Image (tube, rainbow, N blue to C red):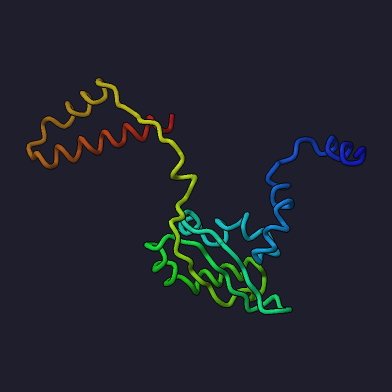
Amino acid sequence: MKNIKSARTNRGLLAIGKFAIQTAGPALQKRGFHRSEIISHWEEIVTPVFAIHTSPEKLVFPRDRRTGGTLTIQTPAPLALEIQHSEQLLLERVNTFFGYRAVDKIILKHSTFMDAKKENKRTRRITIDRTSIHSIESQTEDIHSKALRKALRSLGKSIKTAELQEI
């Protein structure tokens, strides 16, 4: 116990994520993830576009081999077709991550999985003050086309909202 304590003080604070992957190792190995990095680096492997709505479920290799594996990916049904069309690209990216031809096949498992980060993140409602709205309306009142005036006002309000979100 003394060695662990002295080692910790030498390195300072440690990120819990580093230990979570090590601790979860045995559970991940049961699902075929002998290298837990595929879970922790999923977004980098398949790009953020796919990572938002997908997750690796299991990786199965033929007996006594580490090549020719099958990767099962959990994905919402509407996105499955797009992922199926990008299967070769995903295979290439996964195998590049492993450094050898580890995966030969991808199986898509349909689910209702959605990005918890995006779904649970509460967005605060931003309201534009009356002076900004009046300023936008006064700048567009000389425009004769109602449709164009409405579109420009909407654009102005969107820009103002985006500015307020950055603050």
Q: Residue at x 73, y 51 (%)?
A: 23
Depth check, front residue: 20 or 11: 20
Q: Residue at x 40, y 67 (%)?
A: 82
Choose top left, top right, bottom left or bottom right for residue 71. Answer: bottom right
Quarter of the picture holding the N terminus:
top right
Horizontal side of residue 7 vs 60, given as left or right: right
Choose top left, top right, bottom left or bottom right for residue 2. Answer: top right
Q: Looking at the picture, does residue 104 appear above or below residue 161?
A: below
Give the x, y percent position of residue 25. 72, 57
Give the x, y percent position of residue 51. 50, 56
Q: Residue at x 47, y 50 (%)?
A: 115
How many marks the image carries: the answer is 0
- Extreme-left residue of the structure: 144
Q: Looking at the picture, does residue 28 appear above or below residue 64?
A: above
Quarter of the picture holding the C terminus:
top left
Choose top left, top right, bottom left or bottom right for residue 35. Answer: bottom right
Horizontal side of residue 50 vs 14, given as left or right: left
Depth check, front residue: 150 or 19: 19
Give the x, y percent position of residue 12. 79, 35
Depth check, front residue: 28 or 38: 28
Give the x, y percent position of residue 46. 53, 62
Q: Residue at x 25, y 38 (%)?
A: 155
Q: Looking at the picture, does residue 159 appear above or below residue 34?
A: above
Q: Looking at the picture, does residue 148 appear above or below residue 40?
A: above
- Extreme-top residue of the structure: 131
